[in-house]
Each structure stands twice: as structure tokens, then as C-alpha cells.
Amino acid sequence: MANPNTQKAPQDEIEAESAANTSAANAGDAAENGAQSHDGPELGEDVSDGDRDDPLLRAEARIAELEAERDTMRDRLMRALADAENSRKRAEKDRREGLLYGGAKLSRDMLPVYDNLSRALEAASEDVRGTAPGFVEGVELTLRELSNILHKHGVERICPEPGEMFDPHLHQAMFEAPVPDFTAGQIIQVMAEGFRLHDQLLRPAQVGVASTPPG
């Protein structure tokens, strides 16, 4: 008769060996999973912290900030210099125009005085010149002195002659009329002289202009 203990021993050994293999496999899997879960975050943390703590990267970032600030300040400086140069040019232009045309209003206001003196001399007949030569001479001297002063300050007379072509930049047409021996656009009569201060027109010459004959 077989011994029960003898048959049971091999089966216990097989079960023990299987349990040991299962425990070893579970332990290996746990160790591998633990290593993976531990290595992932630590690797990410090491890279991120290294980037933040790297002196070279911090220096490069600071250099980029300083270069951007330098470019901004340079742009502001160039704009300020351009504005200053434009202001200087405008001031210089205003100064030159003030020297050239500062007396334009006074000169324009003096033109009626010139006109009245000229008309007084034109109206003086030979009898008046004979009976009051001193008065006529005084008017002539006053008109001559006024003309010299105006010329000294850059005021020039515009004195067109009959037969000249009408210039809208210098003349003002007071009337038009067809006149024999004159073509359309020619000046036929000068009613008042014009004046200009350098290249600025103070008053156009008032003239009559020939028109095209009818028919």
C-alpha cells in the first residue's frame, strides 16, 4: 500500500515553485513600473530647472532685452533729431521770410500815398507849375523820396506799356475793349502801376485789355 505522504510531496514542491515564479514576476513588473514612473517626472524636472538655472541662458535673455531697449531708444533719438532738424529749418525759413517780407503790410499801406502824390503831379497844369513852382517841386521831392525808400526795402514797380501782353500774374484787367491796331490780350491802357516785394505781389497793375473785335 502506497504512503500518502510520498504522493503529496511532489505536488507540494510543484505548487511552491509556481508561487515563487509568480512572486518573482510580480516583483519584476512592480520594479519596472516604479522605475518608469519615477524616471519620467525627475527627467522633466531636471531639464526645466536646468533651463531656468543656466547662467548662459539667463545672460542671453538679458542681452536680448537690452538690445530691444537699445533699438527703442535709438528710434526715439532718431525721431527727436529729425524733429529738431525740421524745427530748425522751419525757424530759419520763417526768419528769412521775416527779413524779406516783414514790411509787406507797411509797404502795401503806403501805396495809396504813392498813388495820390502821382495823381497830384499829373493833375498839376502848367499854370499851377508856373504860379506855385515850390509846391510842385515839394510834391515831386516827396514822391521821389518815397520811391527810393520803397525800392530800398525791395519794393519794385510794375509799369507795363501799352502793347505788352496781359500777364494775369502781374496785371489786373479793369476793362476790355476792341481797339484798332491791338490784338486780343494786349494792354491798351495803364490805369495804376503795380508793386511787388521781391517775388511777392503787393498789388497788380490795373490795366485795360484789348478784346477780339466783333464779327
Image: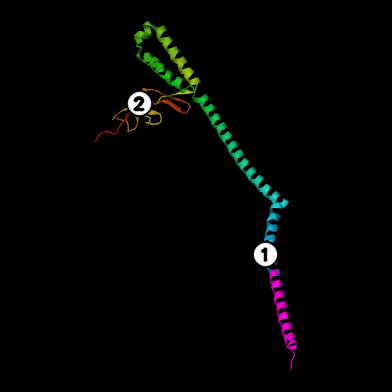
Furthest-left residue in view? 215
- Name the residue tied to disc 2: 207
Please report the bounds of the magenta region as a residue range: 1-30
**Residue at far top of view:** 131
Where's residue 185, x and y in %? 34, 32
For the rendered model, the colour scheme is rainbow
The image quadrant of residue 16 is bottom right
User: Is residue 131 covered in magenta?
Assistant: no
**Image quadrant in which you'd find residue 141:** top left
- The kind of residue on which mark 2 rests is Val
Vertical arrangement, residue 8 with respect to residue 80, above or below? below
Q: Which is closer to the viewer, label 1 or label 2?
A: 1
Q: Position of residue 64 (x, y in %)?
A: 66, 48
Residue type at mark 1 is: Ser
Q: Which mark, by number, is residue 37?
A: 1
Q: In the image, is residue 127 above or below residue 35?
A: above
Residue sitting at the far bottom = 1
Q: Is 103 rendered above or below residue 211?
A: above
Image position, residue 6 (x, y; %): 75, 88
